[in-house]
Amino acid sequence: MNRPERFRPPSVDEVLRSPHCELALARHGRPATTQAVRQVLERMRQAEPPHPAPVKAIAERALACLEDRERPSQRPVINLTGTVLHTNLGRALLAEEAIDAVIAAMRSPTNLEYDIEAGKRGERDAHIRDLVRELTGAEDALLVNNNASAVLLVLNTFAREREAIVSRGELIEIGGAFRMPDIMARAGAILREVGTTNRTHLRDYAEAIGSATGLIMKVHTSNYMVQGFTAAVEPAELAALAHQHDLPFVDDLGSGTLIDLARWGLRHEKTVQDALKGGADLVTFSGDKLLGGPQAGFIAGRKELVAQLAKNPLKRALRLDKLRLAALEATLKLYRNPDRLAARLPTLRLFTRPVAALRSLAERVQPHVADVLGSGWIVEIADCSSQIGSGALPLETLPSAGITMKPSGKASGAALDKLAAAFRALPLPVIGRIAQGALVFDLRCLEDEGAFIGQLRLLKPEAGDVLA
Ligand SMILES: *Cc1c(COP(=O)(O)O)cnc(C)c1O
């Protein structure tokens, strides 16, 4: 009787000695390759029914596993969500000038905290201070890890075990983890809420001031807007009130606009200069929102207050490294020439792409996508509304263009999810969004059209059921 022959896999050694394993050994070394081969053999043994594979196939599988493991966890993606400053996708892209500066700082020791002329210890924020003063009119400035850190440091320095007065209309939450009341608590400040959600008056602030008050804070309601029967107090009035009582008035701007965006047809957003002129003693803002630089938190304002912040031991815990300081310096220098800013600063370049150019782009991209998806999908050019993102200018949308993909048969959410997953599985994952029964790609942030089109042939929308 013929019994099926028992599965006899090759030994680990046999695979390792075969010429098919040479590439894996050369690239990944013996210990890792041995381990990978062992795993492949183990998986083969456990498969039901066990199926033998030739040495060549085993070596190739092992190499594929090893290469897969080497792929960086954080890698480039194509952002077609329509949100330019997408916090989950890393916010602002750096200008080439900033990238060059970071690379130079990585490759060599630098005078990060060294005064070259004097030959003695220097100060790391000094590389940025004069630029911030020049661009914003602030007396002094200090840099920390991000704007959340900036707020934390300010509160901890001036309102620890004291009260921070904030309007109820400004107790914001940004991106889940940043809630103003929580930050205040962690900073050791006691939150003194005044007014109501929709209306806060100067007298509400005035009545709250007492011997325990540490500061008055205004928080930019970055990601929402209270409309209708509303009242908020002008920063200048708040500043005057704070100064009558010898208290600092802090304006948390969030976005960090250094230049009037109306110049490029965007809505005017209060700039750092506006806030300082409006009487703020300290202004806090992010480096990677509208400013278009790396993640960072700025605190700009009165010299004696900045000096107190610098002395807080928390400053050390929140300080910036040389790479981000290098990127910031290069980014800020671009602001010296506003005429060329939109060409050099990616964030602004993306905000100001003309809708006609985006429509032409959609017209070029659409046939390629239609072609690869086949008759199961309707691929159309569509008007889109891009968002600035990161809570900046929440109500501002930018007219844009893109493509929509809908199943040509009965609409099915599962099919859309699968198609979205297939685009995300490409070598350069494409991130879109699903809205109204379609997968939508807003093309505002697509700058490398060739890379997008070039990888479409690798799209595997998982099977006939999606494509059929
Ligand atoms: C975005 C924002 C923050 C937090 O800034 P990060 O740089 O993300 O830490 C704080 N306050 C306001 C008003 C903001 O818009």
Image (cartoon, helix red, strand yellow):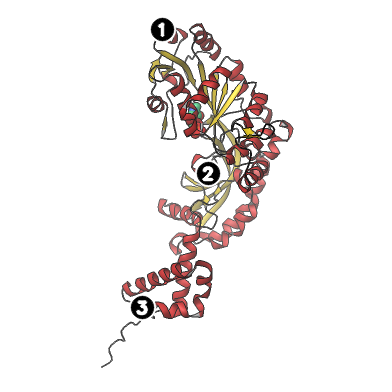
Q: Amino acid at mark 1?
A: Glu
- Return the mark for residue 146: none
56 is higher (above) or lower (below) than 401? below
Seen from the viewer's position, the closer of residues 133 and 201 is: 133
- Given contact means CB atoms under 8 Å apart, are the residues at marks 3 and 1 in contact? no
Residue found at the very far front of the displayed protein: 119
The N terminus sits in image quarter: bottom left
The residue tagged 3 is: 51
The residue that disc 2 covers is 81
Q: Is mark 2 within 8 Å of ligand 1?
A: no
Q: Give the residue at x 63% y 38%.
A: 111
Give the label, 1 or 2, closer to the camera.
1
Between discs 3 and 1, the one toward the N terminus: 3
Q: Position of residue 225 (x, y in %)?
A: 48, 24
**Residue 154, image x, y percentages:** 48, 23
Q: Nearer the viewer, mark 3 or mark 1?
A: 1
Residue 259 located left or right of residue 231? right
- Residue that mark 1 sits on: 207
Under mark 2, the amino acid is: Thr
Instruction: Choose the circle earlier in sequence order: 2 or 3.
Output: 3
**Foreground mark, 2 or 3?**
3
Residue sitting nearer the eye, 178 or 19 = 19
Would you call the spot at circle 3 few (<14 residues within 10 Å), some (14-19), or many (20 or more)? few
- State whether residue 190 is above or below residue 295: above
Secondary structure of the residue carrying numbered label 2: loop
- Residue 222 in view: no
Where does the image place residue 453, in percent across and percent down from the top left? 61, 56
- Estimate the spatial distance between the alpha carbons at disc 1 and disc 2, rounded to whole Å: 46 Å
Q: Nearer the viewer, residue 187 or 454?
A: 187
Q: Is residue 43 above or below residue 391?
A: below
Residue 339 visible (yes or no): yes
Element class at badge 3: loop
